[in-house]
Each structure stands twice: as C-alpha cells, then as structure tokens.
C-alpha cells in the first residue's frame, strides 16, 4: 500500500508487478530455448541481452511516469527567488 502516497496519475502503474513478471518470463523463455548454458558468463550475457533489449523498448515507449507528477513528491530544493541569492565566487 506504499504506492498510495504517490500522485493519483502514477498509482495505476505502480500497483501492478506485471512488467516485472513479463520480464522474468522472457528471461526464462530465452533460457529454455538455449537449453544448457555452459558457464556463468553465458548466463550473464543472456540475461544482460534481455535486460538491454527491454530497456530499449521502455525508452522508445511514451514516458512511463510524468515528471510533473513526480515533482509533487519532492519539495523544491531552493525556496528563494534566484535573483535574491547571494553571488558565488567562481
């Protein structure tokens, strides 16, 4: 229920583990196709390739969570007007 603290527009994406389950299923499917993996390095390469491919797919999709909504979660770091801040030495 920790996802309830997030903005309403993000809750529908956070309460589900479907993307993670789908990723795990894809790793298992690829490992089953290969059959026997000879060493740990080959396992790392296979899983790394699946993760990189999924990352590329996620990057090409529309933004999963809007930045504006996430800004509601964190207070601004500087409350003052930048024009009123003291000058800093370079």
Image (tube, rainbow, N blue to C red):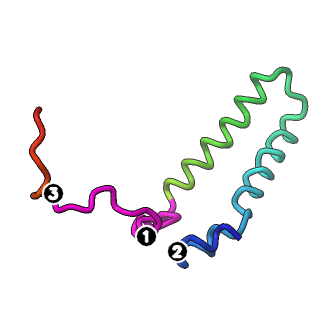
Residue 87 location in percent, x, y?
Answer: 9, 44
Decide: few, some or many residues near mark 1? Use Cα within 10 Å; few <14, some 14-19, many ≥20.
few
Residue 66 location in percent, x, y?
Answer: 45, 67
Label 2: state its secondary structure. Answer: loop
Q: Is there a contact, CB below 8 Å, between mark 2 and mark 1?
A: yes
Q: Vertically, is 86 above or below 22?
A: above
User: Splitting the image into 4 quarters, where does residue 13 fall?
Assistant: bottom right
Q: CA distance from mark 3 to mark 2?
A: 28 Å
Q: Main secondary structure of the magenta part?
A: loop
For label 1, the residue is: 72
Residue 65 location in percent, x, y?
Answer: 50, 65
Q: CA distance from mark 2 to mark 1?
A: 7 Å
Q: Earlier in the sequence, mark 3 or mark 2?
A: 2
The front one of 21 and 84 is 84
Camera-near label (3 vs 2) is 3
Q: Is residue 67 left or right of residue 88?
A: right
Q: Vertically, is 21 above or below 70?
A: above
For label 2, the residue is: 7
Tell me where the magenta segment starts and ends, as one range. Answer: 61-81
- Residue at 87% from the left image edge and 41% from the top image edge: 32
For label 3, the residue is: 82
The front one of 22 and 68 is 68
Which quarter of the rendered picture does the N terminus lie within?
bottom right
User: Splitting the image into 4 quarters, where does residue 45 fall?
Assistant: top right
Q: CA distance from mark 3 to mark 1?
A: 21 Å
Q: Is residue 41 left or right of residue 33?
A: left
- Residue at 14% from the left image edge and 53% from the top image edge: 85
Q: Vertically, is 68 above or below 43?
A: below
- Residue at 62% from the left image edge and 49% from the top image edge: 54
């Amino acid at each position: 229920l920790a996802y309830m603290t997030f903005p309403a527009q993000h809750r529908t994406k956070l309460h589900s583990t479907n993307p993670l389950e789908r990723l795990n299923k894809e790793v298992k499917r690829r490992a089953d196709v290969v059959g026997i993996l000879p060493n740990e390095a080959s396992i790392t390469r296979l899983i790394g390739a699946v993760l990189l491919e999924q990352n590329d797919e996620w990057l090409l999709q529309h933004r999963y969570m809007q930045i504006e909504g996430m800004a509601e979660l964190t207070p601004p770091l500087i409350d003052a007007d930048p024009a009123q801040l003291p000058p800093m030495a370079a």
